[in-house]
Amino acid sequence: MLKIAIQMDPIEAVNVNADTSFDLALEAFSRGHEIWVYQPEMLQLDCGVVRARARQVEHLKREQGDHVKLAAPQVIDLHGLDVVLVRQDPPFNMAYITAAQILERLLPDVLVLNNPRSIRDAPEKLFVTDFKDLTPPTLITRDAEAMHAFRKTHGDVIVKPLYGNGGAGVFKMSSDDSNFKALLELFSEAYAEPSIIQKYLPAVTKGDKRIILLDGEAVGAINRVPAPGETRSNMHVGGRAEAVEMTERDQEICDRIGPVLSRQGLVFAGIDVIGDYLTEINVTSPTGVQEVRRFGGADISALFWDWAEGQRDG
């Protein structure tokens, strides 16, 4: 039996038929592992000892509204666990970075997934630029003049916040859109960080493919198709999941980035591919596990815990 803590958004509020964190927890619970859950703000670094005010999972089932029973909160020493699973949603901000810095103190005695040093150093929209030959033309800056020049060169573009998530703040701007200047001014006022401007890929209308990698190997994929009149394919803004096959280009991308992910301890990752281009590498709380299984693909939660159990047994 493993002792596992999951750092996640409140489990009481999840959608049991869509949430990947819940699916991972349910699989671990079904195997008889001891499961604790807590939110990142419950972390404590007490004289060098990492603790968290957590609640033990007493019961877990796939029945919305009656899916979890939790014990009373208590402060636990995370050094006494086998696995800490980092699964809270972004944004990637100072609170997230601080939580990762605290969890670093557990290494190497506790298996922290993903490796907190690596997720701290791999913000999703920046990390992807390490593979510039796999990605569409991309500029990251706060310099409005540079953004105007980029659009003049590349035509239609996507503009989005560097540390956004879930499709929030994503805009498609055509090459002649007169609102472009106003949008850049809005972003400059709203965000202290740079923004991303990226060449628009018309292939997104056919879908944004999510490929899930486990220790650097592709284990499943789904396609997320935007709703009519929508650029974003995120399912919570109306995107539709559908079955999809991996292409040779998809496999080429995975073969390139997989060894890097594995080497950095980014064991559970989700990449986004539009057409022939890699657009994001999600290493914080990638989703899509339930959709992959629903369309006849692998049971990725089972594969994940097979892997983790093997690491601790080894």
Image (cartoon, rainbow, N blue to C red):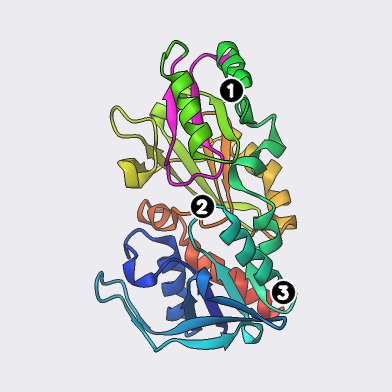
- Disc nearest the viewer among 1 and 2: 1
Residue at the spot of label 3: 105
- Disc nearest the viewer among 3 and 1: 1
Q: Position of residue 21 (x, y in %)?
A: 45, 65
Disc 1 or 2, which lies upstream in sequence?
2
| Quadrant (top left/top right/bottom left/bottom right) for the N terminus | bottom right
181 or 236, nearer to the observer? 181
Residue at the spot of label 1: 144
| Quadrant (top left/top right/bottom left/bottom right) for the C terminus | bottom right
Membership of 158 in magenta stretch: yes
| Quadrant of the rendered image containing residue 147 | top right
Residue at the spot of label 2: 91
The structure residue drawn at horizontal position 47% and vertical position 85%, both measured from the top left corner, is 32
Q: Which residues are magenta?
A: 154-174
| Quadrant of the rendered image containing residue 116 | bottom right
The structure residue drawn at horizontal position 57% and vertical position 11%, both measured from the top left corner, is 152
Q: Amino acid at mark 3?
A: Arg
Disc 3 or 1, which lies upstream in sequence?
3
Q: Position of residue 184 (x, y in %)?
A: 50, 26
Left/right placement of residue 82 relative to residue 234 reads: right
19 or 176, nearer to the observer? 176
The structure residue drawn at horizontal position 43% and vertical position 25%, both measured from the top left corner, is 172
